[in-house]
Amino acid sequence: MGAPGVVADVPFYRQRLGADGLPKPWTLADLRDYAGGASDPAAGRAPPGSRPALYVQLEGSEDVPVYLPLGPMELRGWARALAYAWRLWGVGAGDVVALYDYGSSPAVFLASGLYVPGLGRGAADLLRVTVVCNDGPASMAARMAEAVRCCRPRGIVLRADVARPLVSALAQAGVPAAEAGVAWAAVTTAEEAPSPHELAPLREALGVPVYRTWRADAALFLAPECPACSLFHVPRALYRLEELPEGVAVTAAFARDFPATRYLLEGAELAPPGCHADPRAWRLRP
Ligand SMILES: [Zn+2]
C-alpha cells in the first residue's frame, strides 16, 4: 500500500495547507462550502487533468450536492475495508451476504466488481461469497424478506431507516431471521454510527447480533464494530489515524489518485490495539 497522493496538487487541500505542509483536518461541511463557493460538484477533490472512473454523490449533501471522485485505486482500497468488515463478522468463502441499501452506498457498490466500473474485485469477490442486493426503499421490505427466505444469507447489511420495515416484513412472511440461517445483521448509516441503544429493538426482533458500521464516505472510511470488543476496528494497512484534541483524523492510505487526507471524525477516541479478533487493528470509540 503506497503513500497517499500529493495533496498540494488537489485544489481542496491546497487552500487548506498549513505551515507543516499538511491540510487542516476537515469535515463534510468544509466540502459543502467549497463545492458551493467554487461551483464544483467534486468540491476540488479531483486533481486537474484527472479522470475519475466513478463519481458518487455523498449522502447529506442534498442542498449543495457534493460528488466524490474515485479511481480504481480508491475503489479497490475501500472495497478491502468492506471485505475486512465482513470477515470480522465471520463471513467466509461460500457464504451469502444480503444487502438492503441504495446503490449509492459503499456498503453496496463496493460489494461486487459487477456493480461499478473500475472496481475489479469487490468484497464478495475477494472473500468468494455470493451477494444478493435489494434496493433501499422501505417499500422493498417484502422482497427483502423473500430474499432472506430463499437465499439464507449468513448476514444482512441494511440501512438504519429500513430496519423497522424489514422486521415487520419478516414477521409477516413468517421468516424468523435466525431460523433462516442469518447469523448477524449490520446497520449502516452514511455518517456517524447509530448508538447501541437505538439498535436494541432490532437485535431483539431479529434474534441475532446487530453490528454497527462507522462510515465517512467523504474520506473513503468504513470501519466495522467488532463482535469481540464492541469497538470499531480500523485496519492499519488501509488507514492512518491521528489523535487530535477535537477527535481523530483519518487518511486513506490507498487513495493515491484522489487523496482522502485528514478527515476529522469529530469526538472519536483512539483505543489501544490488542483485541484478540485482530490484535494489530486500530480501535475507535465514538
Ligand atoms: Zn475487537
Image (cartoon, helix red, strand yellow):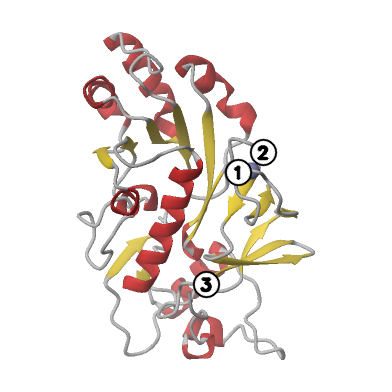
Whether 238 is drawn above or below 132: the answer is below
Amino acid type, mark 3: Ala
Say which residue label 2 marks: 229
Say which residue label 3 marks: 253
Report x, y in % for residue 38. Answer: 44, 80
Residues under labels 1 and 3: Cα distance? Answer: 22 Å
Residues under labels 3 and 2: Cα distance? Answer: 25 Å
Q: Is mark 1 within 8 Å of ligand 1?
A: yes
Q: Earlier in the sequence, mark 3 or mark 2?
A: 2
Residue at (40% x, 85% y) in the render? 47
Residue at (28% x, 68% y) in the render? 54
Q: Earlier in the sequence, mark 1 or mark 2?
A: 2
Residues under labels 1 and 2: Cα distance? Answer: 8 Å
Residue at (43% x, 26% y) in the render? 183
Q: Secondary structure at mark 3?
A: loop
Q: Is mark 2 within 8 Å of ligand 1?
A: yes
Report x, y in % for residue 275. Answer: 68, 46
State the mark number for residue 277. 1
Q: Secondary structure at mark 1?
A: loop
Q: Secondary structure at mark 2?
A: loop
Q: Few, some or many C-alpha atoms within 10 Å of disc 3 (few <14, some 14-19, many ≥20)?
A: many
Q: Nearer the viewer, mark 1 or mark 3?
A: 1
Instruction: Give 277 or 243, whichever is nearer the viewer.
Output: 277
Amino acid type, mark 2: Cys
Whether 102 is drawn above or below 29: the answer is above
Report x, y in % for residue 40. Answer: 38, 77
Instruction: Give 40 or 165, whichever is nearer the viewer.
Output: 165
Q: Few, some or many C-alpha atoms within 10 Å of disc 1 (few <14, some 14-19, many ≥20)?
A: some
Report x, y in % for residue 3. Answer: 52, 81
